[in-house]
Image (cartoon, coloured by chain):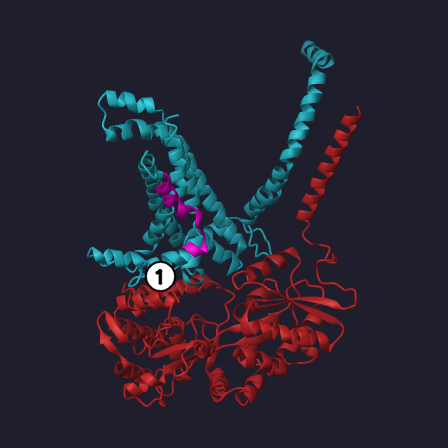
Chain colours: A red, B cyan
Amino acid sequence: MKSKRSNQLIKHSLLLGSTVLLLAACGNGDDNSSSESASDGNDGRTTLEFWSFWGSGARRETIEAIIEDYNASQDAVTVEHVYQPWGDIWTKSLAAIAGGNAPDVIVQDINSVKQRAEANQATNIQEYLDADDISGDFYPQLWDTVLYEDEAYALPFNTDTQVLFYNKTAFEEAGLDPETPPATWDELEEMARVLDQGSGDSWEQIGFYPRWNIGADVWALNADGGNAWFDNSGEVAINTPEKVEALEWMLEWQDYYGRDTINQYEAEFGSGVSDPFISGLVSMRGQNINYYTNLVENAPDDFEFGVAPLPEKEEGSGNWSWGGGFVLEVPANTDHPEESYDFMKYLSSTEVQEEFGMNSFDIMANAEANENLKEHPDLDEMGQMIYELADSNLEVTTITPVPLNAPDFSSLVNTEIDAAFLGQKTAQEALDDAQESVENLAQ
Amino acid sequence: MKAMHATNNQKKTHKPKWNKRKRNEALWGLLFVSPFIIGFIGFMFLPMVFSFIGSFTNYNITSRMDFIGFDNFRRMFTNDQLFLTSLYNTVFYVILNVPLTTAGGVFLAVLLNRNIRGITIFRTIFYLPAILSGVAVYVLWMQLLSPSSGLINTVLSWVGIAGPSWLFDPNWTKPALILMRLWSVGGAMLLYLATLQNVPNQLYESAEVDGAGPFRKLRHITLPLITPIIFYDVITSTIGAFQIFQEAYVMTENGTGGPANSLLFYNLHMWNKAFVAFDMGYAMAMSLVLFAIVIVLTFINLKLAPRWVHY
C-alpha cells in the first residue's frame, strides 16, 4: 500500500514537473520583469545588453574600452557587451524581438532600418531627437537611411565607401605616373592596357577588372549620376541608358580578358589563399576604403599603393560611389529605451566615433569625427589621407536602403546581369527584363 | 440492455482489476514517453499548425498577421519568377541526386561486401566522408572545384579533359553539388552493407550450382533482397534532397543563389523570403507547398513499392 502511494507521488510530481517545464518553454517572455532580461542590478544600476558582431581584433578591443568608459562615466547604467557572430546576429535578434527578450541596443545593417521600422522591430527614437537634435552630426545620406515616415529609428554608426586602390610600383614599372591615377573610365582602360602583361589564358599581370570586389550595381550607379537600381526618388531605374552603357562597358572587359580567365582567377581569389592585389597580379582594384586595413596588415613593407576615387564615366559625370554601413538600434518592446538611447548617443558622439575610427579604420558616420581623423596626430600620413579621401568621397557616395515595396529585388537584377555576362542576353535586353520583373515585384 | 448487462458484469468480475493494472501501466508508459510527446507537440506539431495557419496570412514575425486567403499561393505562381526557378533547381537536383547516390551507395556496398584482406580499412575510408559535415566540407569542395587550380580539374587535365568552371558556370553548379554529395555516399553504403551481410549465403551457393554468374547473382538475388532498404533510402533521401539549403547558402556568396540563380534552391529562396524580406507568411506558404510536393511523391513511392520491393 505504501509503495503504491509513493509510486503515485512520484508519478504526480513527474507529471507536474514536465508540465511546468512545458509551460516554461512555451511562455513567450510576457513577463519582462524576469531576472534574465535587463533590470535593476544590486547596485541600483540598470543593465543594458548591447549586441554587436565585433568579436575580435581592434573593433572588439575598442568597443569594450568605450563601454568601460561609458560605464565609469555615470552610475545609472551598466552596459554589457554581448558578441554575436556575424552570421547569426540578425536572425537571432529577430527571434529575440519576436520572443519579447530582445537586447537593449543592437548594431544593425544600415540598409534595412526602414524595413524593420515598418515591421515594428525597432523602437521609434524620434522623441529623444526632438529634445536634442543630433541629426546634423551625420552625413546626410546616412541620416536618410534611419528615417521611416520622417521619424528616426536608429542612429548611424559607421559607413564605408568604395574607392580605387592602385599599385604604385606597377605603375612605375609600366611607365605610368604613380601620382596620377585614372580619373575617367577611358583613362582606366588605357592604363589597364599598359599595365596588362600576358594574353589568352595566362596573365602575369592584369591591369584592372571592374567586377572584382565591386558589384556591377556600383558601376551602374557610378555611370548614372549616383542613382541606384531604385533612383534617388524611389522609382525603378534599371534600364536607363547610362546603366545599359555601364553594363556594356563591363561586358567589354570580360570579352577582353575572356570569361574563362575571369572565372579562374575569381575562384582563386575566393579561396582567400593569396590577395591578388598584394601579390601583384592585379594592378588596380575597386574596393571598400576599409581594405586599407588589410593592406597595412598583410602587405609587405615595401608595397607601395595609392588610393583614389572611383573613376568617373566621362569628365563631369561624377565619381559616384556606393557605401553601406551600420546603425545602432533599440529593438522594439525593450524596457529601457531612454537609457539605451543615451548609450547610443554616446557611441555616436564625436570623441567616441573618433576613437573607434582611429583604432578600426572604419569610416565613421559622424562627419566631424572623420574630419578630426584627417589631422589626427596619432595617424600616419597615409592614414590621414584615407580619412581625407573618405570624407570627400562621401559627398558622392550613394547608400542604397532596401526599398520597402521590393526588399528582395536584387536577386532579380542579379539574375539578369549574370545572363548578360554569360552571353545569353545583351546588356539592353538584360536590363529591360530586370526593369520589368522588378516593377512587377514592386507593385 | 442485455449487452450492457454483460459489460457491467464483466467490469464487476475480472475486468476492473486487469483494467486498473493496464491503466497504471499505460500511465507509466505515457510518463516515460512524455518528454518526447511534449517535445513533439511543443516543437513540432504546434509550430506546424502555426505555419499552416500562417500560410494564409501576411505574417511578418513582429507586427502583422492578417488573413489574406490564398494570396500567398497565387503570388507564388504568378508574381514570383524566382519561385519557379528555385523549384526547378530543386527538382533538377533531386532527380539527379537521389538515383545517383542510391546507386552509388549500393555499388560501393557490393564492392565492399567481400572477404578480402584489409576490407575494414577500405570500408572505413569510404565511410569517412560521411562523418565530416557542414561548412568545412563545403569550403574544402570549393577549393577542389576551383576551375584552374582545383584538384578535380587538375586530375581531369591529366587525361586531356578541360574541366568546366564548376561553381562559376550555371550549367555546372548543380552537377558540382551532386558530385560533392556522391563523395559522402558512405552513410547509405553502411546501411546497404549491413543488409547485404544478412543475405543468406545458401542462396548464392544454390545459384552457383545452377550456373549463375556474378552478374546474375547480383541481379536476381542481391538486389531483390535489399529492395526494402533501397526503398527506405530512396524515400528518405528524396525528402532530404528537397531540403537542400546549407550547401547553396555557404557556397554562394551571402546565400544569393550563385551564378544566374542556378543554386537558388527552394529552401534558400524560402529563407530569403522569411529573413531578408520578412515575408514570413509567404515563406510558410512555400513550406506548405513543399510539404505537399513531398507528401505526394512519398505517396506515389509507396504505391509503386509493391511492384519492385520484395519483403
Determine whether, in the image, residue B100 is placed left or right of residue B253. left
Q: Quadrant of the N terminus of chain A?
A: top right
Residue A37 inside the magenta-drawn segment: no
User: What residue range appears in magenta?
Assistant: B120-137
Most foreground residue, A338 or A411: A338
| Amino acid type, label 1 | Pro
Residue B132 inside the magenta-drawn segment: yes
Q: Residue at x 37, y 82 (%)?
A: A166
Determine whether, in the image, residue B163 is placed left or right of residue A268. left
Q: Secondary structure at mark 1?
A: helix
Residue A358, visible in the rendered structure? yes
| Residue occupied by mark 1 | B259
Most foreground residue, B246 or A28: B246
The part of the image, by quadrant, that contains residue A300 is: bottom left
Badge 1 crowding class, 10 Å Cα cut-off, few under 14, some 14 to 19, many 20 or more, is: many
Q: Residue at x 54, y 72 (%)?
A: A57
Residue A2 lies, in percent from the top left, at 80, 26
